[in-house]
Image (cartoon, grey):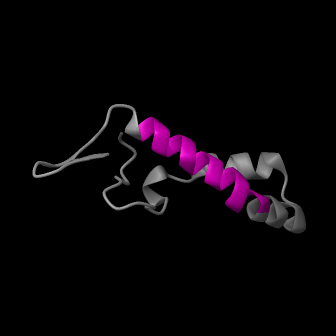
Amino acid sequence: MEKRRGRGMFIVEGAKKALMKDERQRFLEDEWPRVYGTIQRLGLSAAELLERGTAVSPKSWPMRHAGERNDGSD
């Protein structure tokens, strides 16, 4: 996003890709170790996780950012 004095804010080309890269990195560094630890502690298998993950609709996923759609469309 770019601010232009007196003109507002504009989306810069490639902004979504850069934001996703940052969010993925944060997830891998901050959240994944806790998630992985929980998976290990509960003794969940990859097959169980994949089966459950494919059974859940994206519409039920929590929204994380203001303005982000939760209907599976991009």
Horizontal arrangement in the rendering, residue 57 relative to residue 74 (left or right):
right
Q: Residue at the spot x=35%, y=41% of the render?
A: 73
Q: Position of residue 41 (x, y in %)?
A: 88, 68
Question: Between 57 and 9, which is closer to the camera in this rendering?
Answer: 9
Q: Quadrant of the N terminus?
A: top left
Number of numbered discs on residues: 0
Horizontal arrangement in the rendering, residue 73 relative to residue 8 (left or right):
right
Question: Between 2 and 42, which is closer to the camera in this rendering?
Answer: 2
Q: Quadrant of the C terminus?
A: top left
Q: Which residues are magenta?
A: 16-33
Q: Position of residue 34 (x, y in %)?
A: 76, 65
Q: Position of residue 49 (x, y in %)?
A: 74, 52
Q: Position of residue 58 (x, y in %)?
A: 48, 51
- The answer to whether residue 23 is magenta is yes
Quadrant in the rendering for residue 44: bottom right
Residue reaching furthest to the top: 13
Q: Residue at the spot x=43%, y=61% of the render?
A: 63
Question: Between 3 and 45, which is closer to the camera in this rendering?
Answer: 3
